[in-house]
Amino acid sequence: MIALLVLALGAWEPALAQLQGTVNVAWTANAETDLAGYRLYADLDPNIFLLAPSQAAMVADRFVTLGPAATSASLQLTAGQTWFLALTAFDLSGNESGFSSVESATPSLTPTVRTLSVTSMRQGQTGLGVTISGDNFTAGASVSFGPGITVGPVNSTGAPSTLVTTLNADALAQVGARTVTVTNVGGGTGSKVNGFSVTVNVARLDLDGSDRIDNGDLVLILLTYPSVSGDGIYVVTHDLDVNGRIDGADLAIFFAHFGEVGPFP
Amino acid sequence: MIRQAGAKAGLPRTGRLCALLLAGILCASCNTGDEAEELPGSVTRSTPNATFTPAAGADCQIADQLSMQLGRVVGSGVELELVVTDCDGSMSVSGLAFEIDFDPAVANFVGCTAGGFFPGSQLLPGTPACTMSGGNVLGTITLTPPGFVKVGGSGRATIVRVTFNLTQQGVASPVSFAGTDSSSGTALFFLDPSTQATTTHVLGGSGYQGGTFISN
């Protein structure tokens, strides 16, 4: 006779990682030697779990059978709705345990970032309005442009297809490409790699304040070239791309603007 | 603004057509069988013959000096050599900032190349770098710190070559260094071995010698 397999409450330890319409579930394995597998049930109505498992199986929205070695599962469920999930175990004779504790999850939509109305800003620039276009944005979504860029309040009245916000770049924001990430309420995220960039503030290259990018500025850079942050000679004001190194990349930026005459914006 | 960095001299080779006249008159400009070397940017037909006359030689008449000397000339193309003269062995040169004034109505700036004084492998990335705006060429060539080179041997060395193309015939037009003894203008950079710091070397007014573009 196979004892009814009962999942101890402690054995059902759902680790719900809510992804884009996906609910991930994990549990501690049963130790019975005649364990044959598990069944995972999901429904929008928690009351189905008042039924016997054999009856619930006939009405549940989702029903998955897993092998005895399984300790996790992923279900694609309709996003934005609250789902109820529970687990049973069954033995080699087909005897099924009662339901574990019932857990709930609301899978989030995954946003897609397609285009931005503005794709770059200068170090130190403030008040830059940008419209982000894409799909599956939710009301209350947040936006990130990486370190050194402060994102203002996000207007999501255009959801699910547009978000609008205002950006401020630090004076020493790192120069280069940025990944733009939208995070929906509920945790779903979508990104556009290299969707935005920060450009150097040319005024920073005029180290001697002569209103011209020239050898007077180069002489000052040479005092700190080459160096890395933490070195005694490193000076962040000479690190033109603000990547923690005064190197050939900074020289390339310098010579790209060599000879330019101010005043610089 | 014309900008050039780290340029190397490319020399396309062209032949010259020669019109032979009857009764044995030879074309004075024919180089039959030889191909003429051409400087970048120069034009070989209906253009002035150009040259450059330095204001002073680089031969220790002035002990420490930065001067413009005549390099290669082909047709309307003129290459100026910026030459450092050090007859007492006192200079530990790590770089050169230069600013050259010329008349853009009579010449076009073409570019700049390293003169060979500095080892190419030790040049600061991006140098030599030159840019031109109006009639002003701003340029730099420098070694990666803490490098420096002594001017040995004959006491003169070509640091950088600057190429122009003359566009007018029958002119004599001055070319000069600007902003002398200033790191923002024209100055030799020296490395102080004790501090490893780059300093500018003061040559004084007579230490900077330009010259004259001549075309006919």
Image: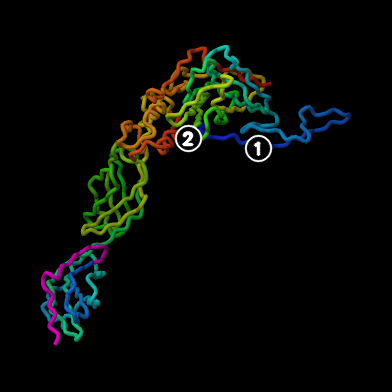
Q: Answer with left or right where residue B13 lies relative to residue A153.
A: right
Is B138 situated above or below A239?
Answer: above
Amino acid identity at mark 2: Gly
Q: Is residue A243 visible?
A: yes
Magenta segment main secondary structure: loop
Is A152 situated above or below A62?
Answer: above
A227 is within the stretch colored magenta: no
What is the number of the mark on residue B12?
1
On what subunit does the disc labeled 1 rest? Answer: B
Between A193 and B82, the one nearer to me in the picture: B82
Seen at 53% across and 24% down, the residue is B135
Instruction: Give the quadrant of the C terminus of chain B.
Output: top right
Numbered disc in front, either 2 or 1: 2
Q: What count of labels does the image hold? A: 2
Q: Tell me, what colour scheme is on the image?
A: rainbow
Is B59 situated above or below A39?
Answer: above
